[in-house]
């Protein structure tokens, strides 16, 4: 059974950067991994995914500002977030992920890490 643990969230100002980490216990080298987020009063939404072949996919809202990457040797996935905006404020979750067409889904969710961006 895979367990995922996120870290790296915090309180930053608009324009700042943060790097989130997602460390897995259990092998995930053959899995696609992804980041999702949930803002207060909103549904959880897809942010980015990286396949086991290192192909990356991004939501339009963060394209060009966020970068997803993974280190299979460390069993860890990362989300580098630059040029943060107040609307990026949310709890960020990592998950084993898959897609159906343009929709992405997750399983084995982590506990989440809070990102707050002040204006």
Image (spheres, helix red, strand yellow):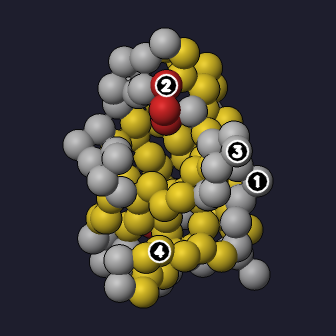
Residue 73 in view of the camera? no
C-alpha distance separating marks 2 and 1: 22 Å
* Badge 3: residue crowd in 10 Å (few <14, some 14–19, many ≥20): few
Vertical placement of residue 45 versus 101, above or below: above
Residue 21 image position (x, y, % from top left): 55, 46
**Which residue carries the number 1 mark?**
111
Disc nearer the start of the sequence (1/3): 3
C-alpha distance separating marks 2 and 4: 24 Å
State the SS at label 2: helix
Vertical placement of residue 46 versus 89, above or below: below
C-alpha distance separating marks 1 and 3: 18 Å
State the SS at label 3: loop
- The residue located at (30%, 70%) in the rendering is 54
Disc nearer the start of the sequence (2/4): 2
Task: Give me the disc on residue 104.
Answer: 4
Disc nearer the start of the sequence (3/2): 3
Disc nearer the start of the sequence (4/1): 4
Residue farthest along the bottom direction in this orientation:
100
**Which residue carries the number 3 mark?**
41
Q: How many marks?
A: 4
State the SS at label 4: strand
Disc nearer the start of the sequence (4/3): 3
C-alpha distance separating marks 3 and 2: 15 Å
Q: In this view, does 5 lie to the left or right of 85?
A: right
C-alpha distance separating marks 4 and 1: 19 Å
Mark nearest the camera among 3 and 2 is: 3
């Amino acid at each position: 059974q895979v367990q995922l643990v996120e870290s790296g969230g915090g309180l930053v100002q608009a324009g700042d950067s943060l790097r989130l980490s997602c460390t897995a216990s259990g092998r995930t080298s053959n899995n696609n991994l992804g980041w999702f987020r949930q803002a207060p009063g909103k549904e959880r939404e897809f942010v980015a995914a990286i396949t086991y072949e290192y192909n990356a996919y991004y939501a339009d809202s963060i394209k060009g500002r966020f970068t997803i990457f993974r280190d299979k040797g460390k069993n860890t996935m990362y989300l580098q977030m630059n040029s943060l905006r107040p609307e990026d404020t949310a709890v960020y979750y990592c998950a084993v992920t898959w897609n159906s067409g343009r929709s992405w889904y997750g399983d084995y969710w982590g506990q989440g890490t809070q990102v707050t961006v002040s204006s």
